[in-house]
Image: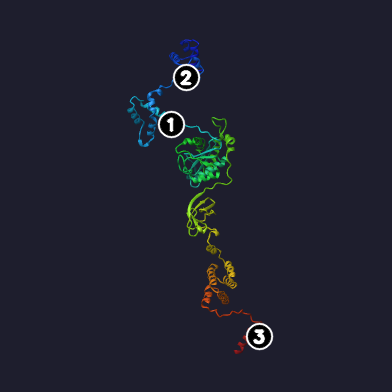
Amino acid sequence: MSQIKQMLQLFKSGKGIKTIVRLTGLARNTVKSYIAKLEKMPFSIDQLLVLDDPVLETHFHAGNPAYSDNRFEAIKQLMDGYIRELENPKNHLTRHALWQEYLSEHPNGYRYSQFCFHLNQHQTARNPSMVLSSVPAERLLVDFAGDTLCYVDINTGEIIQCQVFVACLQHTDYAFAIAVRSQSTEDFIYALACCLRQLGGVPSLLIPDNLKSAVITSNRYEPRINQVLQDMGNHYGFTVVPTRVKKPKDKALVENQVKLIYHRVYAKLRKQVFHSLGELNQAITEKVLDHNQTRMQQHPFTREERFLSIEQPCLKPLPDTVFQIKHYTELKVAKNNHIYLARDKHYYSVPYQWIGSKVKVIYTQTLVSIFAPHQEPIIHIRSLTQGGYTTLKGHLCSTHQHYLDRSPHYYIELAKGKTEVLGQLFERMFNQTSRPPEQLYRTCEGMLQLQRKTAHDIFEKACHLALGEEQYSYRFVSNVITRKTISDMTFQTTKPLPEHENILGSQYFKSQLEINF
């Protein structure tokens, strides 16, 4: 019971001021002032006694008279304008200069100390903090620690500084940390993928800071998300919602988690020397595990216990495939119906109808996908052979496909389809010449052209003549046809002589030689 209620009960029972002072411990003048205020109130003692203590005290203590002063009512209307002028860097305005302007307009106004007090009060009240509610498996807050950890290269002795990626789930404050070489997009994506594997699931929202690995252009209302992070979100099934610029309260939990990592990881590893990034991360993992298994100060459980029981079952499952970073570019199809991927210094084919057009290229660690408007995408296995070509035969025009199909068998079969004697001529040409086949392909093309331009019977006779003379060249066949040397020729099949005994052998000629000498 408050002293005021005790005083009221004693006063109601008819006790005097001295008795009330002795029993309540209040000062004599305080009791007198309470009784004077009681006599002016429109309430009876019984009505006051049923009030709660804080409400009762407001009837006897009106509060600081400064807030009921006319000077306060006047300055309260000016506060918003004063704060805007102070926050504008172009004004170069100080509080003292602003107070002097205020005093020149209000000579009976507050002195400098009270002016600053009310200014601070108003400025603080303009930006109240909000308590954010959380849902299990909803938000994953991520950030990079300001300080770095390092390891020593065992081969060179160089000290390699590493960035430390820190993440925590908002609902249970379950923490994760890993060291990476930099804050680049590749390292950020790698660290985030390791974090999701450690959690064993995927939250609904990812709350990153406005670092370039996550946000290309920061904006309060429509920030531009890094395309790689957006692709990762589509792959895993989370939405990226960056924090507001220069608003650390949006991710206050992970900011506090960074401080805890300093105390429980950095401090404990300060005297250890590591010789690889793997050794460093192994030590970080052990210390973060201890941190998650440490009993929380204001709760009867650990972060790990609460995470395993409440939050992990609510996480979305991880996808079956591993996420690969996609790189985007726009290229022009060259005249040889290939695009040139400068990063690999390699060429990839597209349909020859796309020559001269611009195509979108998306490539990952294993695949190269090429897109043209209103066309089916072309997909190649990515090759790192510098200066090489990855070509699909179906992308070439008929002339180029024919060029790739060239072989002795191809030309022999093609010639037999035209005429049998030309097929025999090609067989003899490829079998009896010492020239490599590639040099004979043009000879074959020339003879096929002669076959198309020349009358059938004349071309047949020219080929027979070439076979009989063993002249397997385009020039010979062409000269025979051009000079018309076969217009009256008749070809007879040469028959072997019949066998008989009237044959002069070597012995006969030897005897004739001896007789002559």
Look at mark 2 in the image and give the residue it sits on.
57
Q: Given the image, on which type of amino acid does mark 1 rest?
A: Arg
Judge depth for marks 3 and 2 and give the one in front.
2
Q: Residue 391: where, in percent of width, then height?
A: 53, 58
Distance from Cα at disc 3 to Cα at disc 2: 157 Å
Look at mark 3 in the image and give the residue it sits on.
502
Q: Tell me if mark 3 has few (under 14), some (14-19) or many (20+) residues whose alpha carbon lies within 10 angstroms of its own.
A: few
Q: Given the image, on which type of amino acid does mark 3 rest?
A: Asn
Look at mark 1 in the image and give the residue it sits on.
126
Q: How is the image coloured?
A: rainbow
Asked if 151 appears above or below 452 in the picture, the reply is above
Judge depth for marks 3 and 1 and give the one in front.
1
Quadrant of residue 514 within the rendered picture: bottom right
Q: Are marks 3 and 2 in contact (CB under 8 Å)?
A: no
Instruction: Specify which label sits upstream in the sequence, 2 or 1.
Output: 2
40 or 234: which is nearer to us?
40
Q: Are marks 2 and 1 in contact (CB under 8 Å)?
A: no
Distance from Cα at disc 2 to Cα at disc 1: 28 Å
SS at mark 1 in the image? helix
Query: Which dot marks residue 117?
Result: none
* Residue at image location 53% in from the left, 45% down from the top: 232
SS at mark 3 in the image? loop
Q: Tell me if mark 1 has few (under 14), some (14-19) or many (20+) residues whose alpha carbon lies within 10 angstroms of its own.
A: few
Quadrant of residue 469 within the rendered picture: bottom right
Asked if 341 appears above or below 150 in the picture, the reply is below
Q: Residue 15: where, in percent of width, then height?
A: 48, 10
SS at mark 2 in the image? helix
